[in-house]
Amino acid sequence: MSKFFKALEQAAQEQARRRHPAPSEPMRERGPAVIETELPEAPRASGLEPPRAVADGLEEHLVSLLAPTSFEAEQYRALRHLIEQLHKSTDLSVVAVSSPGGADGKTTTAINLAGALAQAPDARVLLVDADLRGAALATYLGLGERTGPGLVDAILDANLTVEAVAQACPDLNLSVVPAGRLPSAPYEVLKSPRVGEFLAEARRRYDYIILDTPPLVSVPDCRVIGKWVDGFLIVVAAQRTSRKFLEEALNVTEPAKVIGLVFNGDDRHLSRNAYASRRSSNQDGDR
């Protein structure tokens, strides 16, 4: 149990009482499962340097796309399993990935989760850049100036459909909606009822919609998005995010929609060689 989860033990106990609804309650009113998922360290951008790119212009930490059989990708596949189970049991489709503050690895987590989900042959996945203050998906995915219209354009122009702004990724069941033109008033754009219409259309076309959203504490943008999403994954940076900051993030998020904490960059995580080492030791002992 990490120090963050322990600090929130009381809140988790309160949330657990809502995890299994009474028979008279509709199943959609599920209680939140505050599940800790530890992932390998994602880049913590300072805002001064662009992410490093490798083949095809992809940022090097996007292991779900670049190295789907790697140890790191397996950790995102465990997160994918959580989302798939909630999709089956509660119809969860729209997942917002956020963090208490900036540079905690939320964008990398959103992309890797979408990439892991898209590996299922029958899954239709849409990745949306809803962080209109620090849009980074286009840069991380190497789209550059080819982005064209994006989420903002679709919100401001009701004639633009999801398919008109979504870009399909070759050889993957994944489409990407970049932020598009950055608005002068991001909060007002995200507050528009058109956001709900856009996501409703996305639900009809895709099985999973992953949103890279603004930080929860520093700006109010993510709070107005909350009413249109099914759940929040909150990315917490190991040795960086304070308990107070995380508590503030949870306080501004609807408790029933917190589906997990992604503990990012924990150096105490199970070593990638531990399984092989244990297997080797067991084989030696059997001889």
Image: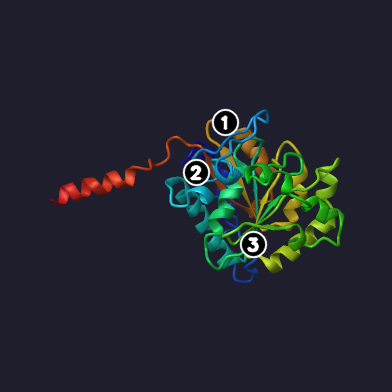
Nearest to N terminus: mark 2 or mark 3: 2
- Residue 240: which disc? 1
Residue at 21% in and 49% down: 282
- In percent of the image, x 30 and y 46: which residue is there? 276
Please state if 258 lies on the left or on the right of 178 as rendered: left
Lateral position of residue 63 relative to residue 126, left or right: left
Question: Disc 2 marks which amino acid?
Answer: Leu
Instruction: Give the spatial CA distance, label 2 vs label 1.
Output: 15 Å
Q: At 77% across and 52% down in the image, what residue appears?
A: 150
Residue 86 place in picture, x, y as percent: 56, 62
Say which label, 3 or 1, has the lower sequence index.
Answer: 3
72 versus 43 height, above or below: below
Q: Where residue 68 sits: x, y (%)?
A: 47, 52
Q: Is residue 125 visible?
A: yes
Position of residue 252 measured from the top left corner of the image (x, y, whole percent): 71, 44
Amino acid identity at mark 3: Ser
Question: Measured along the vertical axis of the image, is residue 277 above or below residue 207?
Answer: above
Q: Is residue 193 left or right of residue 174?
A: right
Task: Give the total of numbered labels.
Answer: 3
Q: Is residue 115 above or below residue 3?
A: below
Query: Does residue 9 appear anywhere in the picture?
Result: no
Q: Secondary structure at mark 3?
A: loop
Type of the residue with mark 1: Arg
Question: Circle 3 sits on which residue?
Answer: 93
For marks 2 and 1 on the same chain, the one whose residue lies earlier in the sequence: 2
Badge 2 marks a residue whose secondary structure is strand
Q: CA distance from mark 3 to mark 1?
A: 30 Å
Query: Which disc, if any, is residue 39?
Result: 2
Q: Quadrant of residue 187?
A: top right
Q: Position of residue 175 (x, y in %)?
A: 65, 58
Please state which of the two labelled residues, at mark 2 or mark 1, is closer to the viewer: 2
